[in-house]
Amino acid sequence: MKLGIIGGGAMGSGIAQVAAMAGWEVRIFDTQETARNKALKSISDSINILVSKEKMSASEGVATLGRIYMCEKLETLNDVDLVIEAIIEDLEIKKSVFKSLESIVSDHCIIATNTSSLSVTSLASALQKPERFAGIHFFNPPVLMKLVEVIPAVQTDSEIIYQVKNIMESWGKTVVTAKDTPGFIVNKVARPFYSEAIRILEEGIADIATIDDAMTSHGFKMGPFTLMDFIGHDVNYRVTESVWKAFFYDGRYRPSFTQLRLLEAGYLGKKTGKGFYDYQSDSKQMLTENAALSDQIFLRIISMLINEAADTVYQQICNPEDADLAVKLGVNYPKGLFEWGKEIGYSKIVKTLDDLNQEYGEERYRVSRYLRNLAKN
């Protein structure tokens, strides 16, 4: 089987490596020679690490690299079985690429996008045969992250989704299916982890280090501010903004000026040495040791996350099992949000949100009908 990748960036090269490790022949197309060279080096370095950690034999490493070809012409993808696009998040640029691609590939070739925030249905509309199009959303880094979200466009043939899921599972991935809505499952459900943490900071309830500690002491691998710095504010802010706009400016997803200012200053997080934290300085931020405050912060953020997961199921974007699987494998949450809801008690979650709604009078704290029903039952 043959895979075509459009875009030699981190996601494109990562997906290419996953497929090559599963025995597929892979062709990476990128117009820029520097991007092609960087992709090949990145894959080679990654394979060397896997070999050194004995996750792969040296001969398997050589064979994997031997299945990957760099291409400077789109026409080289003429006989592939599947193409995954992983370029800039720009609707018109992607549509233009798909129009060119469709005249090159065979009729049986599945065409897919790795978009994290754009409408799969809108992208599919660029094709003469949109029924063969789907969203296949990997998480960074694709080689290590087990989750793949598969997103049918309105036009997608159900047989294509069946084929795509089988391919992804044969590559060793865990697949969840999501409706074509902004942010799909993970990027939608995870928004309050960031936005509610910033809100608590902006209100002066607690400082950055205290909020991060409240979440890590309750089982999260990274606090929200550390994670935003790790992801990069150029990426994290823009995903929040795109979800907010795509949901018709719903107040629950409103971005924050605090994060926007960091983006404008070029303080993008760890990659620039400064974000919410200063990575060039040795000074550590002081932590407020207060167990009651820590519990209060955790309950507020987790309640917002559980409510978002409940609303995602209520909107029939996915089922509860896939919602739990998605956050555990896509953003490394220690538990699924429905698991957590049962543990804490749905009625306690509803009361927390109702109290916040009463206090602020804002739509961001409205309780999902699905969550209220869980609390009643």
Image: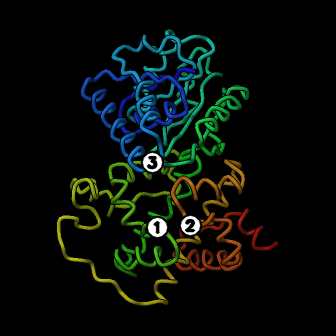
Q: Which mark is in front, 1 or 3?
A: 3
Q: Position of residue 219 (x, y in %)?
A: 52, 73
Q: Position of residue 316 (x, y in %)?
A: 71, 49
Q: Nearer the viewer, residue 65 or 62?
A: 62
Which residue has dot 3 on it? 54
**Label 1, on which residue?**
221
Q: Are marks 1 and 3 in contact (CB under 8 Å)?
A: no
Viewed as shown, does residue 273 lie left or right of 351? left
The relative height of residue 73 versus residue 156 in the rendered view (above or below) is above
In the displayed structure image, the side of residue 163 where residue 238 appears, left or right: left
Measuring 27% from the left and 24% from the top, which residue is drawn there? 32
Dot 3: few (<14), some (14–19), or many (≥20) neighbours within 10 Å?
few
At horizontal 47% and vertical 24% (from top left) the residue drawn is: 26
Report whether 296 appears left or right of 205: right
Sooner in the amino-acid sequence: mark 1 or mark 2: 1
Contact between marks 1 and 2 (CB within 8 A): the answer is yes
Q: Quadrant of residue 371?
A: bottom right
Query: Which residue is labeled 2 in the image?
Result: 334
Label 1 or label 3, whichever comes before in sequence order: 3
Q: Quadrant of the N terminus?
A: top right
Q: Amino acid at mark 3?
A: Glu
Residue at the (54%, 80%) spot, across then down: 359
Q: Secondary structure at mark 1?
A: loop
